[in-house]
Amino acid sequence: MAKSKEILRGAEIFCRALKDEGVKHLFGYPGGAVLHIYDELYKQKDVEHILVRHEQGATHAADGYARATGKPGVVLVTSGPGATNAVTGIATAYMDSIPLVVFTGQVPTNMIGNDAFQEVDSIGITRPCVKHNFLVKDVKDLAATIKKAFYVATSGRPGPVVVDIPKDVTADSCEYEYPKEVEMRSYKPVVKGHPGQIKKAVKLIMSAKRPMIYSGGGVILGEASKELNDFTKILGYPITNTLMGLGAYQATDKQFIGMLGMHGTYEANMAMHHCDVLIAVGARFDDRVTGDLEKFCPKAKIVHIDVDPSSIAKNVPVDVPIVGDVKHVLKDLIAMIKAEITKPDTKVLEPWWKQIGEWAAVDCLKYDRESTVIKPQYVIEKLWELTKGDAFITSDVGQHQMWAAQYYKFDKPRRWINSGGLGTMGFGLPAALGVKLAHPDETVCCISGEASLVMCIQELSTCLQYDTPVKIISLNNRYMGMVRQWQEFFYSSRYSHSYMDSLPDFVKLAESFGHIGIRVEQTADVEDALKEALSYKDRTVLMDVITDQTENVYPMIANGKGHHEMQLSPNSNTEQRELA
Amino acid sequence: MRHILSLLMENEAGALSRVAGLFSARGFNIESLTVAPTEDPSVSRMTLVTGGSEAMVEQIHKQLNKLVDVIKVVDLNDYRHIERELMLIKVLANVSARDEVKRMVDIFRGRIIDVTENIFTIEMTGSGEKLDAFIEALDEKLIMEVVRSGVSGISRGDKAIQS
Ligand SMILES: Cc1ncc(C[n+]2csc(CCOP(=O)(O)OP(=O)(O)O)c2C)c(N)n1
């Protein structure tokens, strides 16, 4: 006799499906519409629920978890305000193509559309910032929809998926079976690149005299870091990473010439401007990367590899587009290059590398190391040294984010975790909490600014409750530094509402949350203070580092300028610029 | 340039708003849009008339394809195709204008489908251009109401756009 399937209530199905999907952590916050589910969560042990202190924190924490592991982050929030609070985090994940599955409670099906208590159209509100969303109207569809949600979130170009579950669906019962596989006729991501295009690409790549590899977050999402390193080393070409792509290629390797874009290095941006063949891998030609499109890579033929066809030729016309999973395509390219009779000729590249060396001699990231007032760059360099470049670093948004990207040299993928696309202040702390849950034995630091940090400061409680000891390094310049910098450059130093008045005592604040607070005011104390903070293995530490208020992020490409029109720091060797 | 896109999509609640939302969020033009079920009740067909530079139309095509509910997108401009639109139009047709209107309807191969003492309701199908021409040909003062369906299109010959 065939074993009859179990009959379960929707709320039980929810918990079982998460278990069967292999979910270990669920970031959530309860409320009326999800109480049946919370009751089931209470009875089970397979999924650990992390009670955040604000639903924005839940989505960012799940996002950090996903970025650090490659696994989807999972969130559960209630209807109405629970769902709207989660939206910022969903949009943040969407812009950076991060796999999240966000479950939102909904009012019962018979009340939908009646302006019921805590009703919002979660499907409508999230539609423009999700990869896809589902409203489950019948408990019989629940398990299959959950399976689809995980599949869509994690395959192809990843992204957040919202599943809206009305309360009555969690009370109704049906037979439970979790599907093993999903088949969707309308959704079939491309994996292999077209062989003809790959051949064309190899031809173009091998003909380059001034080549440049420009790789982005897609390489990290596609787990193609090894292939990118192999590809780059076989060719001996220079490589730059986008803000989202840092760590995909070893930053300490000699072929790496720094990040590119608005605050990229002089050598990376100049090489972009002068290259004759550009190989774009898992990158999307974002406006913060390209500068003025009219002036973008004027001399280059472009190869573009991306899993999302709509990323190709969206902003910049491309000569050889290759749609496919970056890992597969890079493997195919490597195989074909190895099989070529003509080997990459290092002689051809000599003048190009010499030119890049001259640009690098401008030393665009040089800053005043003698200063007694703490320079933010120094703090990050020291952190890099003390953590041996091996920590997981999350950040918020602003100057500190750019300095972290410039001065912490990431050698491995998934170590640099920041909101690049949406630029969401408040991301850093909850993201760090998510990372620490995923990697309890690793050092996790959040580099923040005093303005960003307070946007999700409530998650310090979550850090205590779930024992996720992270190290927060708040570069406190008493300004929304990035706003202040733009006001200095473009608004004749009229610092309109960018001064952070009435700041809390961050040391006491940390202590009141049950953590350790350390204030640092002198350059001479930075190193010891960092060592001390890192030595507290099982405590969360908030470092309030009082930094130079006037420091700016350089180099900078202003709006409307091209890669070759960077504004350089007064500290860099500007005479060298003339020579180069 | 004007393009007619023919889409097959899952017949799911909200599918239409995904397409409409995409166009407004990305600033794409929609000239007209029609949706109806197909021979397979789980699939809807949408016919969309849009325009813009070639690069923009390419983006529209790709973005539509990216929607998880969309099964297939075909640009009918890439095929020999037929397009038709249905128009229902109400015109004043009192004694003095009656014959003239009737004659125009015949010339354009329309049909009068409802008649009152002073009014004809006319049904007409054809390309958008033909319908425009008919409206042009009528005395503007006579037109009471125009209802147009938006364009439907199909490829010629044995080529069929199926899921
Ligand atoms: C939620 C949100 N609101 C506003 C902004 C605009 N913004 C970008 S950077 C910035 C200032 C950040 O200040 P702080 O966190 O102190 O970092 P700093 O630039 O001083 O290092 C602001 C307000 C944003 N990115 N996110």
Image (cartoon, coloured by chain):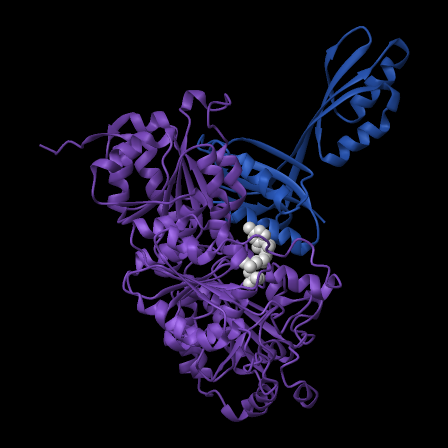
Q: Quick one: A33 or A387, which is closer to the camera?
A: A387
Q: Is residue A380 visible in this depiction of the protein?
A: yes
Q: Quick one: A119 or A112, which is closer to the camera?
A: A119
Residue positioned most to the right: B96
Q: Position of residue B82 (x, y in %)?
A: 65, 39
Tally of marks: 0
Residue positioned most to the top: B117
Q: Quick one: A56 or A454, which is closer to the camera?
A: A454
Quadrant position of the C terminus of chain A in the picture? bottom right
**Considering only vertical position in the picture, is A178 above or below B39?**
below
In the rendered structure, the answer to whether residue A360 lies left or right of residue A53 reads right
The chain assigned the colour purple in the figure is A
The residue shown at (48%, 67%) is: A245
**Considering only vertical position in the picture, is A444 above or below A334?**
above
Q: Position of residue A239 (x, y in %)?
A: 51, 77
Quadrant position of the N terminus of chain A in the picture? top left
The chain assigned the colour blue in the figure is B
Q: Where is residue A157 in the image (x, y as percent from the top left)?
A: 45, 55
Q: Is residue A187 visible in this depiction of the protein?
A: no
